[in-house]
Amino acid sequence: MFFLEPGMLTADVISADRDAQTTSGFNVRVSTVMPTGSRWWTLMVGTSFTPFGTSGVSERNLNTPTFFFGNIFPILDARHSGGWLTVSLPVLGHYTFRGGSTRNRRLYGNDLYVEAAFTAHVGEKLLSDLGPFWKQLDLYVYIDQNLSPNKDLTTFEIDRFNPLFLYGLKFPLAGSAR
């Protein structure tokens, strides 16, 4: 399954450095999900970027791409919510600009993230009469938390809880979402 996920990214909302401002911007995320024979192993690979940058003065005001890869662990299946909601917990490696530890001298580095992924199946529930494309339209809210937080480059302190919020529309481009 191949998805286009246009939406918004908001950072520095919770537990941000006192000099950082909350920052938001248009975000484009493209992901490929590869189910396996086991419900516990669903591989995901993709990229995410803010093509116009974000508002606010923040270290996260970048339009550089983030590449991610990992596994999706199911929490709540759509069958258990009447077809309305799916909740999952992807554990992802992020390869991103300024990623990795402060000892990383390269432009890009790896971090480990956990993502609380909430997907509302509004197309299936509300737009099914408009055709098969609209039937697979979903709304998403992802909360991404870095599990390998790095020292801030200016204060040299580690912020252990400063999630990214991603939210928007999820369009299937190839394959079948359900």
Image: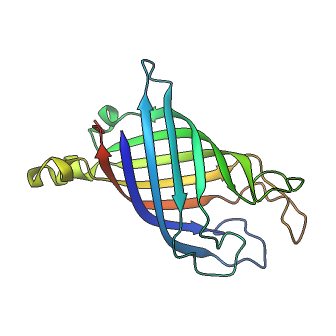
Residue positioned 45% across, 47% down in the render:
31
Total numbered labels placed on residues in the image: 0
Which quadrant does the C terminus fall into? top left
Q: Looking at this rendering, what residue extends furthest in the front direction?
A: 106
Left or right of 128 in this view: 3: right
Left or right of 19 in this view: 141: left
**Picture coordinates of residue 34 (x, y %)?**
43, 32
**Picture coordinates of residue 72 (x, y %)?**
51, 35
Looking at this view, is 107 or 138 the one in front?
107
Looking at this view, is 118 or 106 the one in front?
106
Residue positioned 90% across, 53% down in the render:
103
Residue positioned 50% across, 25% down in the render:
41
Q: Is residue 74 above or below residue 168?
A: above
Left or right of 57 in this view: 135: left
Q: Looking at this rendering, what residue extends furthest in the left direction?
A: 129
**Picture coordinates of residue 21 (x, y %)?**
68, 79
Q: Is residue 62 above or below residue 147?
A: below
**Picture coordinates of residue 11 (x, y %)?**
62, 67
Q: Looking at this rendering, what residue extends furthest in the top direction?
A: 37
Q: Is residue 16 above or below residue 163?
A: below
Name the image colouring: rainbow
Which quadrant does the N terminus fall into? top left
